[in-house]
Image (cartoon, grey):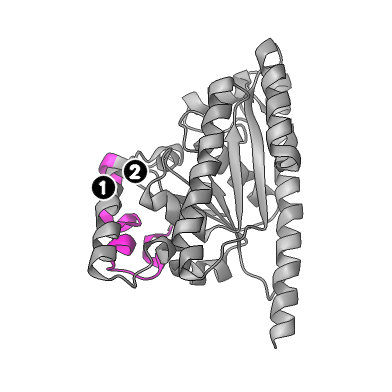
Amino acid sequence: MRPQMATACTLCIGNFKGGVSKTTTAATLAQGLTLAGHRVLLIDCDPQGSLTTLFGILPDSEVAPEDTLLPLFNGDQDDVGYAIRPTYWDGIDLIAAAPVLFGAEFALPARQMNDQAFEFWRVMDLALDNARDAYDFIVIDTPPSLSYVTINALMAADGIVMPLPPSALDFASSAQFWNLFSDLTSTLVRARGGSKRFAFVDVLLTKVETTDASAILVKKWLSAAYADKLLQIEIPKTAAAIAGSAEFGTVYDQLKNAPSARTLKRATDAFDRLVDLIEDQAQMFWSNQTERLGSAQ
């Protein structure tokens, strides 16, 4: 469990390409972490609001601007607490998203233009300080683009999890993600004398089909490109996962009404392993954090 002196481990679920299971990964990982006894804050940063919808909230009709991160990015709020709401899942709170969140893509650069000292990429990071004391994990779902909001999510994170199907197009897109992000950190952070380091970076294979022969070759490419960052965990494409998505849920939501016990077990076993790994990485992060705090006192 999280040591008393430590703060929440913040995870960014990121990939610039859509359709790679970012939202499903964020929701299912959060549920798995609560089943392991943790308190989790989920943050939906995608104006499409897919994660919000997955938790039974309609972005277009049930989410007001003040329920999203928009007031934070506008400068009207400086702490995310105003937008946190409970969900149907015990142990998970949510900050919802709605199409109005697109406004952040105009608000943040406008503030930067008016104040050259303003660091637009640190808005979310600073606003999470109180939440980090209240939760064990903060999981951020990002839009499929290098937006101002995505940059904020990445800069607020302690670790990155990139969901990545084993296909040639998705592999090519992932390379662009890291190239652009490297350029970004060099331009924004190092140019101002700062630094950004992550406790861990995970590449997670998703939508894996055992009968897909081409995926075997792509996995070899991924292994060569990402080495130890490529997790030895594969999230399978199963009937249980498809059924969960169709009913606006996850494989953990399907535990009582599974279309097939075998396919459900494949999916839940994979996420159970992912939860165990994230917990191990978080323990290392917390250990380093408490060690630094102890030496500073």
Quarter holding residue 235: top right
The stretch in magenta equals 60-84
Quadrant position of residue 238:
top right
- Identity of the amino acid at label 1? Val
Instruction: Where is residue 210? Give x, y as percent.
Output: 71, 16
Q: Is residue 93 visible?
A: no
**Residue 94 counted in the magenta span:** no
- Work out whether mark 1 precedes mark 2 in sequence or the reverse, and give the earlier one: 2
Q: Amino acid at mark 2?
A: Pro
On-image quarter of the N terminus: bottom right
Question: Tag 1's secondary structure?
Answer: helix
Disc marking residue 47: 2
Q: Position of residue 182 (x, y in %)?
A: 53, 50
Circle 1 sits on which residue? 100
Residues at circles 1 and 2 in contact by the CB criterion of under 8 Å: yes
Which residue appears at 71% of the width and 76% of the height? 292
